[in-house]
Image (cartoon, coloured by chain):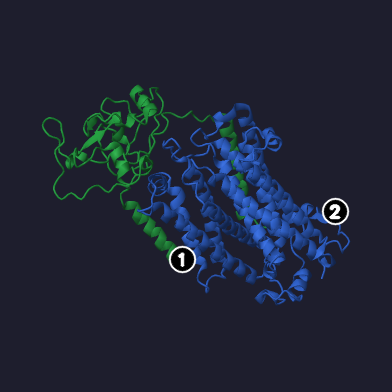
Chain colours: A green, B blue
Amino acid sequence: MLCAIAAVLGAALLLLAPPPAGAVGQAASGETLFYPCTSCHPVGPQGTATGLPNDFPGHQVVLIGHDALGEGSAACLVCHDDPARDPGKLVLLDGSLVDITGDVPALCFTCHSERYREWAAGTHGRNQPSCTSSGCHDPHTPAWVYGDPLLPFVGTGFQVRSVSDRQAFTPLAGPPVKAPVVTPSWLVLATLLVAFLATGIVGYLVRGRSAR
Amino acid sequence: MRMAEHATVAAPPRPGVVRFIGIDWDFGALKSASPRYWAFVSLLASLFLLGLMAYATFMTRGGEVFAMRDDYPWGLWFTNYMYYVGLSAGGLIVYASVHLFGAEQFRPLSRLAVLMAGVLVLMALLGIITDMERPWRAAWMLLTPNPNSPFVYTGSAANIYMLICFADLWVLLTGKGGEKLAHRMTLIALPFAIYLHTTTAFVLALNKSRELWNTAVMVPIFLTSATASGIALLMIVAYLMQRLGVMRFKPSMFRSLSTLLATVIIIDLFLIAVEILSVFWPTSSHPGHAARLALFFESPYGWTFIPVLLLGAGAFALLAPRRTRHLPAIQLTAATMYVLAIFLKRYALMAMGFAIDPLGQFAPPYTPSLVEVLIAVMILSIGLLIMTAAAKVLPLQVPEEEILAHATAPGHLHGHASAPVPLEPAPAPAAPEAG
């Protein structure tokens, strides 16, 4: 019993703890929320990235899904230019370079062209001018989505929100008005009569004497 | 010794007794019943008629008379289905304990236990048929069953289990086939009981869109809750039957029943605690799970679940001390607390799936409409009418010679129960059935 009581009390205490908070970002805002590249790769006055900080040991990134791009660092070089030459530059298929603060979705487009077109048409993502692919997706593991993308629902009913396990959950408001419950007045009257009768019978049963 | 030797078939029927399908129906007892008995029957009949009017109302006016809506489609009747199915487990546990495991101390309860199990499953089925709103549609479940739906399995299991219970009762009352047939019937009934309770739990657990239902521990929790509440109800009914002079039991039987009840209660509470900790453990908590279960501690839904824990822990605390466990007041209080706790738990169980729907929308607590309550009361009155009539008409008291014969028979050495202690005398009857 003590175990059960302790478990119940423990559970009640845990309720006081705040729920798991959002890990990095809450919504697609146009910024690269997963990897704040510019904190280590400061962008110069002309929009070009400067060199790497001294003594930087290099990135240790585990790819899930994108590991299909190559073995070891070869997978990195499919999207990133040689960091010794152009740190903070992304490379497209035709060899042209894109700054990490530039048109990053163009890099995603090279493989995910269909999804890119959906995004451009406003049917994928949040359909905002500043919205970028890496604003919602982890660029190294795109299946990880941080945020609460809302469907472009334009009706007057409810909105659907997909909630990540990494984000705090709060219930939405329920439907505005429920249909009223109808109870015929004659049934209410009959119930009152039977309740009156039942009270009398119960009183008789409780207070009356047995015939035996 | 064969059961038939000391069963009702051996003696010629008394005046007022009609022998039908091998059972002595004592209709003469109805003629000599006291006015209080008939007053109680009148009360139940009034409630039944009132429920019938409510039923006619919903058949003519449709769903507008219900409080069940899209966000809360399973209301009082489905809650009662889960509750009554669970309560029926107690009867089978006792019946199986006697005929399968040789727990002779429960033999005096066996007829009452099987009757109660059958009636409770009947009430559960009446509830679920009512919930269908158009009863004739039940035939479609048989004609076009969907094997992916757990309803096919729980519905069929409930029907078959009810028939098995009444067949078992017939075997016990007539003594046909003796102990051997009773043993074989138990071998059939026990797997079906587990099947019924498991599939009933699966109705909830297989909904992956309802996070709090979609847990593997739902099935064992359902089994333990069912067993505990069933045993508790059986204890209450047995005390009631003894008080009314219908049956007599030894105090040692109630003590054994209390020990069994306390054991199952603590297992049930342990499983609930495991589920709560799994949901709220900070490093493994799913936000959806935690937010949903948190509603049952701090929102308007709190009144449904917090009392379950308090009543459950209280019932166990009452039954745990060995020095006071034998006291009838302690036993009855604990049993009543747990029967109430499991009803609230069934309500909370329904609400756990509906409080926040799969779209993430909050639904306020469901309160049944008057029509729903009256129909639920009608179903309850049907069950009580059957039990009230059975208490008069059916030979529910197991003959003392049968108890003594099994208690002293070789191979039935089960502790204190094996001693041929005579039953305590029946107290002065003071309730409606007294006649």
How far across and down, in percent of the image, does residue B225 sit? Answer: 55, 56
Q: Is residue B76 left or right of residue A40?
A: right
**Displayed quadrant of residue B420:** bottom right
How far across and down, in percent of the image, does residue B114 sit? Answer: 70, 57
**Displayed quadrant of residue B355:** top left
Q: Is residue A93 left or right of residue B149?
A: left
Using the image as rendered, state which of residue A88 and residue A163 is in the foreground: A88
Q: The disc labelled 2 sits on which kind of residue?
A: Val
**Which quadrant would the C terminus of chain B be assigned to in this image?**
bottom right
**Which quadrant would the N terminus of chain B be assigned to in this image?**
bottom right
How far across and down, in percent of the image, does residue B57 sit? Answer: 62, 30
Determine the residue positioned at 55% across, 29% down: B64
Determine the residue positioned at 35% across, 52% down: A15
Q: Chain of mark 1?
A: A
Determine the residue positioned at 57% across, 40% down: B373
Secondary structure found at label 1: loop
**Displayed quadrant of residue A122:** top left
Other-residue count near label 2 (Cα within 10 Å), few / some / many at <14 / 14–19 / ≥20: some
Using the image as rendered, state which of residue A81 and residue B257 is in the foreground: A81
For label 1, the residue is A1
Q: The disc labelled 1 sits on which kind of residue?
A: Met
* Mark identifier at residue B362: none
For label 2, the residue is B18
How far across and down, in percent of the image, does residue B324 sit? Answer: 52, 71
Report if residue A156 is visible in the image: yes
Are labels 1 and 2 assigned to the same chain?
no
Q: In this rendering, which labeled residue sits more in front, label 1 or label 2?
A: 1
Q: What is the C-alpha distance between the residues marked 1 and 2?
A: 51 Å
Q: Chain of mark 2?
A: B
Other-residue count near label 1 (Cα within 10 Å), few / some / many at <14 / 14–19 / ≥20: some
Asked if the residue under mark 2 is in contact with the one under mark 1, i.e. CB atoms within 8 Å, the reply is no
Determine the residue positioned at 27% across, 41% down: A34
